Amino acid sequence: LADTWTRSMILAILSLLLLLAFAAAQPSYVDGVTVLTSEDFKKGIDAGEYDVIIDVRSESEWDDGHIEGATLALNLASYPSDEVETASPADFAGCETCTIVVYCRSGARASVAIQNLFAAGFNGTVYNGQGINQWGSAGYSLVNNDSVVPPCTLNEVGQCAATVPPPTPVPSPIVSESMAPSAPSTSSMAPSAPSTSSMAPSAAPEEVKVTTLEPEAFNNGIDNGEFDVIIDVRSQGEWDAGHIEGATFALKLAMYGDPTRATASPSDFMGCETCTLVVYCQSGGRASAALDNLIAAGFNGTLYNGQGISQWTSAGYPLVTTDSVVPPCTKSESGTCVAPMTSEPTTMAPSNNVTTGDSSDDSASSIHSWSIAVLVGVLSVLVV
């Protein structure tokens, strides 16, 4: 009897450990929105992964200290309200498809504010950064500088700019008395004249043209074999979660040149300098920065900004978790491009053209999977 009781207790404890291990492996979500730990929030800031960081607290809370680079969206969780002054989702017009992180004091108001953004048509990558409580507990500091004007509020919708260094903080119109949204720019950021093609080019440095593709044009180009290389410039975790079929993973290419980061390099694509390349990220901002790096390295072929996974999936196109592809042009002399590509691209696992950073995440995942496997094995023995 004692042996049976002991065996039952061990089984119960191991079952609980298995459940906890499984739960720990799952990302945290609230209302379908990814909730960032303070550590992940800080890493994203350092990596330039957010187009907008929104603080939705009151003005007095903001004045007591806020996260560097944030924009104050006064009481956005209370929008619309006749009782308190609030910011509006319209204050962020132009950022609808961008990467946004929202925070408050503990995460609750951030969650409500995010739902207000969704209701207003925002469909980019949106994170709940929780709040100042968690941020301070993790040992990160607060600042007392001015609210930042998000660059995407000055652009055409969809022209996000993650990985571009933040502008010098200036008083934001979002905390002004009128709470009126910023007026669209009529300078060089103004949209170009409409084109009969979804591939209308926009000017890029050194007279190299970069064309922004809508998802439909991107997909058609893949189907027609129009691209020599499809480059994904996101992080390892984003790649692993799903990417476009036929893509080559170029780890954080938008951040190339930062000595503190493990990144891919334009030289990884040596041989493809005059070829047809399409670059994408999550929403288009990092793709733009990566294209600038390629152009600066002498790439002068036909270059496309494929925007990002946000637009791709919104258009109903699938993602895959296959290996990164070795571009055929990297195996040839410069200028020997091969589009249209063969229907069965050569794959690699992994490519020498890809800098393998963020390995700690993969190691943790492997250890976690091993631990679960051991627990399952022990449970199976005990049951028998």
Image: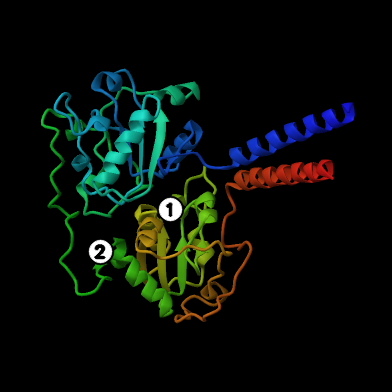
Q: Badge 2 local density, few (<14 within 10 Å), some, or many (20+)?
A: few
- Give the position of the C terminus as an image quadrant: top right
Residue sitting nearer the eye, 61 or 358: 61
Identity of the residue furthest to the front in this view: 1
24 horizontally vs 169: left or right: right
Q: Are marks 1 and 2 in contact (CB under 8 Å)?
A: no
Whether residue 60 appears in this view of the structure is yes
Q: Amino acid at mark 2?
A: Ala
Secondary structure found at label 1:
helix
Whether residue 296 appears in this view of the structure is no
Q: Badge 1 local density, few (<14 within 10 Å), some, or many (20+)?
A: many
Q: Tag on residue 168?
A: none
Q: Earlier in the sequence, mark 1 or mark 2?
A: 2
Q: Tag on residue 203?
A: 2
Q: Amino acid at mark 1?
A: Ala
Q: Which color scheme is applied?
A: rainbow
Residue sitting nearer the eye, 56 or 342: 56
> Looking at the rendering, which quadrant does residue 190 occupy?
bottom left
Residue sitting nearer the eye, 118 or 43: 118
Which residue is found at the position 17% from the left and 30% from the top? 81
In the image, residue 175 above or below residue 192: above
Q: Position of residue 234 (x, y in %)?
A: 47, 53
Q: Tag on residue 254?
A: 1
274 horizontally vs 149: left or right: right
Q: Position of residue 314 (x, y in %)?
A: 35, 59
Distance of label 1 from label 2 (alpha carbons)? 19 Å
In the image, residue 148 above or below residue 213: above
